[in-house]
Amino acid sequence: LATCGNIKSAGIRVYSVLLEEDATVAKNLMRDCASDPSLYFESPSASELKAVFQAIAQDLSNLRLSQ
């Protein structure tokens, strides 16, 4: 969690994906690691993983890069 905080503090957008895991502790950790709860994805099966990555790709395509 500290590593996630350091990455986010550096201005890096963090997405997290949890695959086939039901433990509440793991879910909370991965959700808290994401830059925003909307950037946390649960994929209960490998077959649903494609949709998760499509959602992430769509979100990334809406970002604007600036310096």
Image (cartoon, grey):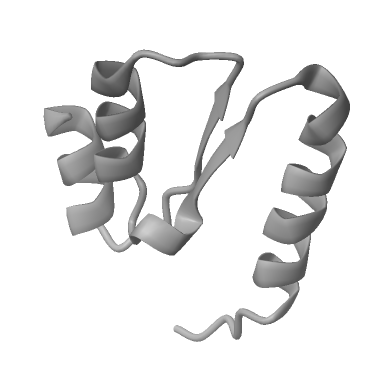
Q: How many badges with numbers are in the image?
A: 0
Residue 22 at x, y = what percent? 45, 16
Can residue 9 be seen from the camera position used here? yes
Tell whether 21 sits left or right of 19: left
Can residue 12 be seen from the camera position used here? no
**Quadrant placement of the N terminus:** top left
Residue at the (50%, 86%) spot, across then down: 66
> Image height check: is 63 above or below 46?
below
> Image height check: is 49 above or below 46?
below
Tell whether 55 sits left or right of 12: right
Tell whether 7 sits left or right of 30: left
Residue 36 at x, y = what percent? 34, 61
| Location of residue 38 by image quarter | bottom left
Residue 4 at x, y = what percent? 25, 37
Residue at the (17%, 43%) spot, across then down: 5
Outermost residue on the left side: it is: 2
> Image height check: is 35 above or below 49?
below
Tell whether 53 sits left or right of 50: left
| Location of residue 56 by image quarter | bottom right
Residue at the (76%, 45%) spot, across then down: 53
Q: Nearer the viewer, residue 55 or 60?
A: 55
Residue 32 at x, y = what percent? 25, 42
Q: Nearer the viewer, residue 4 or 20?
A: 20
Residue at the (20%, 30%) spot, across then down: 3
**Quadrant placement of the C terminus:** bottom left
